[in-house]
C-alpha cells in the first residue's frame, strides 16, 4: 500500500512535469480577464466608430515572444470594441512563423517583418512593428534578451495608441498627409535631435500618426506645393518679406491649412495675415497662479473643439506664451462666409497678461496688464458649413502663442497634454476631425494584465487564499481518513 502511494505520487510528479514542459514548448496559455484588461480607451472606440468597413489585422509573431500576450490582449480589446460600436469590423488572424510556414512566406513576400502587425482595409496595407509599439531605447526580440535585461528597461507599451493611429490612417482618403515645415527664417527644425531644444520627439509622433514631414523654403516658389496638407511655421526669428507674406496669404485664401507657432518678442510680418482671419497676437504673455515653479503657466480651460474635446481632464504647460484675442471684425474680404474663430485654451479667471515675462516673481498690475481669462491658442475656419459633396476645401488656421511647449525637453520633463494638443492640431488641419487623448489605462494594463489594485488582489489571493484552501482541503481529507 505504501509503495503504491509513493508510485502514484511519483507518476503524478512526472505527469505535472510533462504538462508544464509541453505548455512551455508550445506556448499554450489560458487567460482569465481580470478587470478591464481588454478594454480600450474611449478615444480608440471613437476611432473605430468613425471607421467603416472591415479591417483585418494579422499578428505575425512568435507565441513564445514575451510581448505576445500584451499584443494579443490589445487585439482582443480592439475586436471587442468594434463589436460594441457601429463602425469598423475587426478581424484578427494569428500567424506563428514557426508553425504556419506557408502563410509566413506570404507575409514575407509582402515585406512584413516578424513580430509585427499587418493592418488591411480594402486594398490598403499598413505595417506596425513591435518596436513602434514598445517605446524603449533598444528593441528586445527574444526571450533570452528579455531575461538578460532588467525588467525596468522594457519601456512603455504604446500599442493601443499606435494601432489607433494606424486605423485612422487606413480610413483617410489619402495614404499619408504631407506636412511641410517652413524654413529659412530661423524656425525650429523638425530634424533637430537636441535633448532639450530639439523637436525630433514631436516629429516622430507625427510620423507615427501617418504624416510625412518635408522641409520647405519659400524663395523661388510661385505657390505652395499642391500636395501640402498642412504648412507649419514654427518659431520664426526673422521677418518674412512682402512676397513671402503674399504667397502665404494666397495659400490661405485658396483653402490652405496653416499652423503658426509664435516666437517670443518677434514680429514676422504674418500678424497682418492672422488679423485677416480674426486672430491677433497681443504684446502680453500668459501668467497666473496655476504654475509649477513660477516660470510657467498651467492651463486647463479648453473650448469645445475637436482639438481640445478629449483634453478636458488634462493640462497644458507653457513658458512664454503670447496671449491671443479674437477680433470682432476680421479684416478679411466681406462675404457670406466669414472666418469663425474659436479660442482653444485660456488661462483661468485669476490669470493675466504679463508685460514683463522676465521679471520674477510675476505680479499682476491692473493698471497696465489685462486680466484673465486670456487665450494662448486659437483656430480660425472658413467654409466649414459648405456641403461635403461640393469640391471646396475649407480654410483652416491654428495659432499657438508659443513654440517651445513641444520641444524635447518639455515633453520629457513635464507630465502634460502638450504632445496630444499639438498632434490634435495638426490632425484637424489635415482634415482628421477626431481628437486624440492619452490612453486612460489601456496600454498600462495590457503589458501585465493587471492594474495596481488588481495586482494587490492577485498577490493577496496567491499568498493567502490559495494556500488556505489547500490547507482546508488537507484537513478535511485527514479528518475523513481518521474516521
Image (cartoon, rainbow, N blue to C red):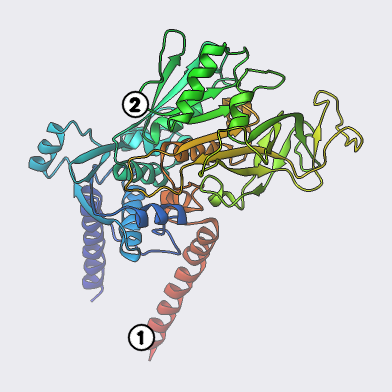
Between the C-alphas of marks 2 and 1, the distance is: 84 Å
The image position of residue 446, as x and y in percent, is: 41, 51
Q: Is residue 325 visible?
A: yes
Establish if 64 lies above or below 193: below
Query: Is 240 left, or right, of 42 in this rendering?
Result: right
Element carrying mark 1: helix
Q: Which residue is mark 1?
A: 481
In depth, the one of 293 and 370 nearer the eye is 370
Q: Nearer the viewer, residue 101 or 333?
A: 333
Tell me the residue at 21%/72% (across/down).
4
**x, y (%) of residue 109?**
12, 32
Q: Residue 136: in sight, yes or no?
A: no
- Crowding at mark 2 (Cα within 10 Å: few <14, some 14-19, many 20+): few
Q: Position of residue 414 (x, y in %)?
A: 63, 35
Q: Which residue is mark 2?
A: 227
- The answer to which quarter of the image holds residue 40 is bottom left
| Number of numbered discs on residues | 2
The answer to which image quadrant residue 79 occupies is bottom left
Q: Earlier in the sequence, mark 2 or mark 1?
A: 2
Q: Position of residue 149 (x, y in %)?
A: 43, 33
Name the secondary structure under disc 2: loop
The dot on residue 176 is: none
On the rendered structure, is 301 left or right of 83? right
Q: State which mark lies toward you, 2 or 1.
A: 2
Amino acid at each position: 500500500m505504501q509503495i503504491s502511494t509513493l508510485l502514484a505520487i511519483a507518476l503524478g510528479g512526472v505527469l505535472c512535469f510533462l504538462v508544464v514542459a509541453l505548455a512551455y514548448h508550445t506556448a499554450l496559455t489560458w487567460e482569465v480577464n481580470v478587470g478591464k484588461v481588454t478594454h480600450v480607451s474611449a478615444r480608440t472606440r471613437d476611432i473605430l466608430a468613425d471607421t467603416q468597413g472591415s479591417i483585418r489585422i494579422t499578428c505575425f509573431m512568435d507565441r513564445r515572444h514575451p510581448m505576445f500576450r500584451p499584443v494579443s490582449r490589445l487585439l482582443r480589446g480592439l475586436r471587442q470594441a468594434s463589436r460594441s460600436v457601429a463602425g469598423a469590423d475587426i478581424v484578427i488572424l494569428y500567424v506563428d512563423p514557426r508553425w504556419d510556414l506557408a502563410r509566413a512566406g506570404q507575409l514575407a513576400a509582402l515585406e512584413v517583418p516578424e513580430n509585427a502587425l499587418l493592418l488591411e482595409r480594402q486594398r490598403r496595407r499598413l505595417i506596425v512593428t513591435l518596436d513602434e509599439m514598445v517605446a524603449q531605447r533598444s528593441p528586445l526580440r527574444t526571450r533570452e534578451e528579455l531575461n538578460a535585461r532588467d525588467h525596468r528597461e522594457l519601456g512603455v507599451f504604446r500599442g493601443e495608441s499606435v494601432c489607433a493611429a494606424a486605423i485612422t490612417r487606413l480610413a483617410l482618403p489619402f495614404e499619408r498627409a504631407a506636412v511641410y515645415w517652413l524654413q529659412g527664417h530661423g524656425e525650429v527644425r523638425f530634424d533637430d535631435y537636441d535633448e532639450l531644444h530639439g523637436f525630433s520627439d514631436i516629429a516622430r509622433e507625427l510620423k507615427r500618426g501617418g504624416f510625412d514631414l518635408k522641409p520647405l523654403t519659400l524663395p523661388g516658389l510661385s505657390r505652395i506645393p499642391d500636395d501640402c496638407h498642412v504648412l507649419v511655421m514654427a518659431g520664426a526669428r526673422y521677418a518674412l518679406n512682402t512676397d513671402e507674406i503674399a504667397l502665404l496669404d494666397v495659400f490661405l485664401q485658396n483653402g490652405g491649412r496653416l499652423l503658426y507657432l509664435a516666437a517670443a518678442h518677434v514680429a514676422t510680418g504674418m500678424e497682418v495675415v492672422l488679423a485677416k482671419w480674426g486672430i491677433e497676437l497681443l504684446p502680453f504673455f500668459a501668467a497666473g497662479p496655476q504654475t509649477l515653479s513660477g516660470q510657467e503657466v498651467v492651463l486647463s480651460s479648453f473650448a469645445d473643439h475637436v482639438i481640445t474635446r478629449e483634453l478636458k481632464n488634462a493640462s497644458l504647460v507653457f513658458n512664454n506664451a503670447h496671449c491671443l484675442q479674437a477680433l470682432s471684425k476680421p479684416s478679411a474680404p466681406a462675404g457670406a462666409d466669414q472666418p469663425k474663430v474659436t479660442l482653444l485654451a485660456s488661462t483661468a479667471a485669476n490669470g493675466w497678461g504679463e508685460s514683463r515675462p522676465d521679471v520674477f516673481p510675476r505680479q499682476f498690475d491692473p493698471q497696465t496688464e489685462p486680466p484673465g481669462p486670456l487665450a494662448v491658442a486659437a483656430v480660425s475656419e472658413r467654409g466649414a458649413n459648405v456641403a461635403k459633396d461640393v469640391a471646396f476645401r475649407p480654410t483652416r488656421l491654428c495659432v499657438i502663442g508659443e513654440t517651445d511647449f513641444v520641444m524635447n525637453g518639455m515633453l520629457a520633463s513635464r507630465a502634460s497634454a502638450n504632445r496630444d494638443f499639438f498632434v490634435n492640431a495638426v490632425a484637424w488641419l489635415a482634415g482628421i476631425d477626431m481628437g486624440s487623448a492619452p490612453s486612460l489605462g489601456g496600454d498600462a494594463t495590457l503589458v501585465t494584465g493587471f492594474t495596481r489594485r488588481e495586482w494587490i488582489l492577485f498577490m493577496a489571493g496567491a499568498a493567502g487564499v490559495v494556500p488556505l484552501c489547500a490547507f482546508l482541503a488537507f484537513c478535511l481529507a485527514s479528518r475523513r481518513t481518521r474516521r
